[in-house]
Image (cartoon, helix red, strand yellow):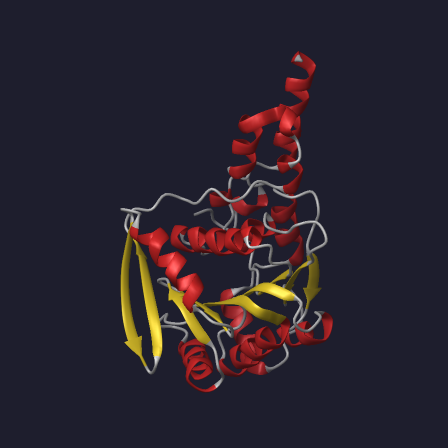
Amino acid sequence: MATIQEATRPPRRLDDVPGWFPVLDQLLFDWLLNRQEAAGMRGDLLEIGVYLGKSAIFTGRHRRPGEKYTVCDLFEGEAPDDANRAESAKSYSALTRGRFEANYRAFHDELPRVLQGPSSLVAAEVEPRSCRFVHVDGSHLYEHVRDDIGAAHELLGPEGIVVLDDFRSEHTPGVSVATWEAVLNRGLRPVCLSTQKLYGTWGDPAPVQRELLAMARERSDCHVSVQEAAGHRIVRLKSKGMPAAAPAPAPAARTAPRYGRRVRRVAADLLPPVVTRAIRNARAARG
């Protein structure tokens, strides 16, 4: 993982971007988003809490024409309360909007819509029922996470997916309480659990669970277990030496058949657009 100091240089690979986005979660993000797209599901994307952009860069590859991608973070802005201010000073003092945007632009030509401020902005800025995928990775304080989950419920379409980060980390009990409260009392239904994230829906989780289990059980690098708890089917996944996922190519690469599989592989490896363009120009000059 890159350090904050290294982040001042433009990243060339996703692993160059500081942050916490394990390969299992890369696989799950990619699989769930691809599943939605294959089923013809339309909807916007939302990430609450972006840090320096690692998961946002990855998710941005799935934004399709006509869809919106919104991200929200305090960055260097003022926190809404003393507890959140202390949390930001302790864990995110080096985070700035400029760092995030520079990292994102290294992989995408266009920035997402950026909301700078507390996550309470999201409910007023994103249309109800407009989203198909929401990643909640902002404050770890119970009150904020509870409200972020409530916002996700209002913003997701009927079969949309919400991802809750740090739901069982030892240093984030507020996230754990808010997450399981949502499952037990607020209608959230788990789809699966990774080491750090709970994937859920307010729709029917059974169809996606069936397909997910079939996919995971075919892999030798993914441990799977299924449990029942409080009327919920809990699918647990754990990486066993899993390689990094190859995300979907950017839309521009999908519509450029002249360059064939070679350019699609470049896009899948998340090369910066400037490198991709150089390869295309060189091939055009030879042709």
In percent of width and height, residue 263 lies at 57, 29
Residue drawn at (52%, 51%) of the image = 34
Q: Farthest top residue?
A: 286
In percent of width and height, residue 271 lies at 56, 36
Task: Give the quadrant of residue 67.
Answer: bottom right
Q: Which of 111/60 is in front?
A: 60
In the rendered view, would you say 174 is above or below 239?
below
Q: Which of 76/25 is in front?
A: 25
Q: Which of 131/150 is in front?
A: 131
Residue 75 as seen in the image, left or right of residue 174: right
Residue drawn at (51%, 73%) of the image = 203
Residue 277 as seen in the image, left or right of residue 237: right
In percent of width and height, residue 206 lies at 41, 68
In the rendered view, would you say 205 is above or below 187?
above
In the rendered view, would you say 33 is above or below 180?
above
- Residue 181 seen in render: yes
Residue drawn at (55%, 70%) of the image = 88
